[in-house]
Amino acid sequence: MSGHSKWSSIKHAKAIKDAKRGKIFSKLARIITIATKEGGGNPDTNSKLKDAIEYARSFNLPKDNIDRAIKKGTGEIAGGALVPYTLEVFGPGGIPLLIETITDNKNRTLTEIKTILNRHNGKFAGEGSVKWQFTQRGALELKSKNEKFKNKDEAELEIIEVGADDIRWENDTVTIYVPPENLAQVKTDLQNKGFEIESSGIEWTPKEAVVVENEKTKTVLTKLFEELDEQDDVQNIYSNIANLHESTTNRTNNDS
């Protein structure tokens, strides 16, 4: 299968230079703080924190920032009053969206996102009216510029053998999906086989994906996603659009 329905605010800004580096560092630090709050400050016993730290380091988040984010999560220093919150939204054309946020002020976040949605023909959806169209799956992003992928067919067989139930190719990244409860074991098995893992976690994936043909709708959606990216509390956006990155990749790369 092809296509990836996740728009990651952090990942799409990976090549952006200093002008937005502070914003991205802030988003990465929040992920670390939340992981710490949920499972403790020791990455050896908190796999979610370990993954968050590895991901942050891939963006060159300084060690001091990482340590400070962990201390916020453990309560050693002030500023750990962060809460993850998922918003259900209908975008332009009725496209269902799930927006993951991490915020210390839910009312402020809702107000700012509502303003963005209003500008792009979007609106908040009733509780449960969007989530039912998605399911949570474990997701691992692998670097395809790796010796393991010199033979694509053999690589895919090895990935399937460790428990992947879906493989999606996109540019230099291979995203594989597994049952959420198998995520940690599959990650370990892949690393033992020599695959390089760029990131891993639990994602929302659509039960049925759609292809958007209308160029005007694609443009409106792209502008909506980009503006949501600029909102400090937004972490990830999920849609049911199969060809999401066909309409966004060039625009994103041109920002670097």
Image (cartoon, grey):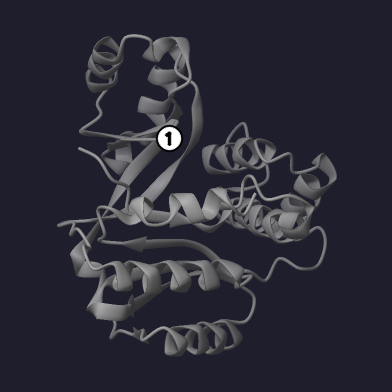
Residue 139 appears anywhere in the view: yes
Residue at which label 1 appears: 141
Look at the image and tell me whether residue 128 can be seen.
no
Left or right, 209 with reference to 159: left
The x, y position of residue 241, in whole percent, is: 26, 59
Closer to the camera in the image, 87 or 37: 87
Q: Is residue 85 left or right of residue 68?
A: left
Left or right, 45 with respect to 21, comes to left
Relative height, residue 159 to residue 166 (above, below): above
> Where is residue 157 shown, x and y percent of the image?
23, 15
Residue 141, compared with residue 255, is above or below; it is above
- Return the x and y of residue 49 as percentages of the image width and height: 59, 43
| Residue name at image x 45 percent, y 31 percent | 172
- Determine whether, in the image, residue 200 is placed left or right of residue 57: left
Graded by Cα atoms within 10 Å as few (under 14), some (14 to 19) or many (20 or more), the crowding at tag 1 reads many
Using the rendered view, name the quadrant where residue 21 is placed. Answer: bottom right
Where 69 sits versus 173, above or below? Answer: below
Q: Quadrant of residue 231?
A: bottom right
Residue under the point 62% across and 35% down: 54
Amino acid, disc 1: Glu
**Residue 132 percent location from the top left of the image:** 19, 68
* Nearer to us in this view, 87 or 2: 2
Which image quarter is the N terminus in?
top left
